[in-house]
Amino acid sequence: MADRADAVARVREHLHSGAFLAELGRRVGYRTESQNPGSGEALRAYLVDDLQPAFAALDFSTRLIESPTGKGPYLLADYREDPSLPTVLTYGHGDVVDGMEGEWRDNLDPWQVTTKGERVYGRGTADNKGQHSINLAALRAVRETRGGKLGFNAKFIIETGEEIGSPDLRQVCEAHREALKADLFLASDGPRLSADRPTIFLGCRGGNRIHLDVNLREGGHHSGNWGGVLANPATILCNAIASLVDGKGRMKLDALKPPRISNAVRAALADVKIEPTADEPALAPDWGEEGLSSAERLFAWNTLEVLAMSSGSIEKPANAIPGRANAVLQLRFVVGTKYEEVIDAVRAHLHANGFPMVEVSGTQRFAASRTDVDSPWVNWTADSIRETTGKSPAILPNFGGSLPNDVFAEGLGLPTIWVPHSYPGCSQHAPDEHILLPVTEEALAIMAGLFWDLGEKPPGTGVRR
C-alpha cells in the first residue's frame, strides 16, 4: 500500500526527471510584469493558458475573476472531495517585477530558466512562480500516490497584482468569502531564514510611509551672503529626524514602538540566528533596539528607516542655502502597534520639540498580521517538516517584509501558515533571480509531506484515518 514516503519519493523524481524545471520554464516564459502597463495580455494568458489546464488535470474546477479596479485578473481553483474533510486554501501570484533584460550575469535571458550548478535562473523562479509551482507539483504527487484522491479539500487563489501592492485582493476575497472558506491557509512566498533551514512564518510586518517636508522658500540663496541668518531646511530636517531615531537606529518616540515582546514569541525566536552569507550584507554591530537579539529586532520589533532624503543638488551642489528639504521614512511594525496613530503622533512630537515648520503626511500604509504562535497548526506544520527533513524548522512569528497576509488572517479569519521555498540570497526583484536545486528538492518533499499529513492527521482529529 502506498504511503507518505512514496509521495515524497514521487515528487523528488518529478524534479530529477526534469519535468518540474520544464513546467517552471514554461511559466517563466510568460512576461507577466505587472508594473508594465502593457502586460495585461501576458497576465491573463498565464492564468488561462497555463494554470487553468494544470488545475483541470487535478480535477479542480476553475474560474477567472476580473479585477474590480481594472488591474490583472484572478484565478480561483476549487477541489471538493468530501465536506467532512478539512479544507486548505493556498495562494500564489503570477506577476513578476521588471525583467531587467541586459543586466543579468552572462547576459542570461530572464524569460527562460537556465541552470548553472545548483542555481536555476529566471524571472519568477523565486518570486513567485517557482513557489506555487512547487506546491502544485507536491499536490499532484500526493493525489497520484493516493490513487486519485487527496484526503482533503483544496482551494487556490492566484493573483496577478502582488508586485503592485495587491490593490484589490482584499475586495476580491471579501466578494468571494464563501468560495474561499477553509480551515487553514497554507502558502509559500518570500525566503527561508537560510538556505539550509526550513522555515515557517505566521504573518508579516506592516509598513507605514512617513513624508517629512520642510518648504521654507523658493530657490536657493548665496551661503556667503545669507549663511547664519537664513534657516536651512536641510539642517532642520536632519535634526527633526534625529529627534525620532538616534544614530544607532533606536527609536526615541514611544508611539513608534510595539508592545512588549511576549514570552511565546521570545521562545519561538530563541534558536533563530541571523547569519548572512558571503553574498549578503554583514550585520551592523550595536545597531537597533538595545537588549534584543538580532532575530527579535528583525521579526518581533519595529524599525524606523530613512528611505530617501533630498535637498539641493548632490550632483551639482551650489554655494547656496536650499529652500526645501524632503525625506521619506518608513515604520516597519509588528502586530499590536497603534499604526493608525503614527502620523499624528510624529506631527505632535515634532511640533512640540521646535519643528513646527516640518510638514508630516503619510502614504502607502499596510497592516501587520500573524497567527498566534500557540495555534495547533504551528506545531502540526513543524512536526510534519521535521518528519520529512529530520530538521527542526525555524518558526518566525512574522516575515520581516510584507505580504498580503492580513487579507487572509483578518479578512477571512484563517490561521495563516507560510512555508517559503527561496532563500535570502535569491536576488528576487533584481537581476540574476534564481532558486537553488537542493532547496527546491527539499521544498517539494516538505510540501508533499504536509499535503499527505493533511489527509491523514490534521490537528484535533486525535488518530490517523
Image (tube, rainbow, N blue to C red):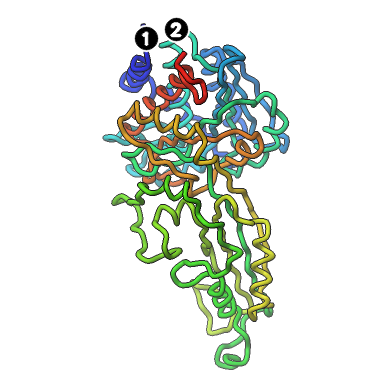
- Residue 8 occupies which quadrant of the picture? top left
Tag 2–tag 1 contact (CB < 8 Å): yes
Front residue of this view, candidates 223 and 146: 146
Q: Is residue 86 visible?
A: yes
Q: Inspect the image, locate mark 1, and give the three-letter code of the amino acid beneath it.
A: Ala
Q: CA distance from mark 2 to mark 1?
A: 9 Å
Q: Inspect the image, locate mark 2, and give the three-letter code of the amino acid beneath it.
A: Gly
Horizontal and vertical percent for residue 131?
Answer: 45, 32
Vertically, is 254 above or below 5? below
- Name which residue lies at 39% across and 45% down: 424
Disc 1 marks which residue? 2
The residue furthest left is 117
Q: Is residue 432 visible?
A: no
Vertically, is 465 above or below 123? above
First in residue order: circle 2 vs circle 1: 1
Q: Is residue 387 left or right of residue 67?
A: left
- Name which residue lies at 62% across and 62% down: 210
Horizontal and vertical percent for residue 289?
Answer: 45, 64
Horizontal and vertical percent for residue 43?
Answer: 58, 31
Disc 2 marks which residue? 147
Front residue of this view, candidates 109 and 5: 5
